[in-house]
Amino acid sequence: ISRTVAQYGANIEELETQCLPAPMSGEEIFHARARLRMPLTLSAEVLHTALEDIADDIAVDLLPVAQD
């Protein structure tokens, strides 16, 4: 994930992580929430699409992008 973020010229400025029980199984799963700083020329949708492209390979579910 960090490699893809960096390839697009963005930076991870804040990162929150925690392990929580999965809703159905109760098995512990890893959650991460990040705040990114992106170049003005990069749209959030383009970066989100790039992350979606690698998500299956690393078994990650991405939530929709929120912009400030």
Image: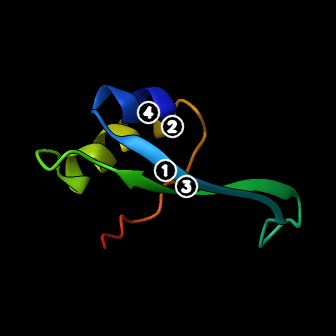
The amino acid type found where label 2 is placed reads: Asp
**Residue ID at (77%, 73%):** 23
| C-alpha separation, residue under disc 3 versus residue under disc 2 | 24 Å
Mark 2 lies on a secondary structure that is: loop
Q: Quick check: marks 4 and 2 in contact, CB under 8 Å?
A: yes
| C-alpha separation, residue under disc 1 versus residue under disc 4 | 21 Å
The residue under label 2 is 56
Sequence-earlier tag: 1 or 2: 1
Q: Position of residue 9 (x, y in %)?
A: 28, 33
Sequence-earlier tag: 1 or 4: 1
Q: Is residue 50 positioned above or below 22 on the image?
A: above
Which label sits on residue 13?
1
Q: Quick check: marks 3 and 1 in contact, CB under 8 Å?
A: yes
- Which of discs 1 and 4 lies nearer the camera? The answer is 1
Mark 1 lies on a secondary structure that is: strand
**Along the horizontal axis of the image, is 6 left or right of 27?**
left
Q: Quick check: marks 1 and 2 in contact, CB under 8 Å?
A: no
- Which of discs 3 and 2 lies nearer the camera? The answer is 3
Corner quadrant of residue 59:
top right
Q: Residues within 10 Å of mark 1 (few under 14, many from 20)?
A: few
**Residue ID at (39%, 66%):** 64
Sequence-earlier tag: 4 or 3: 3
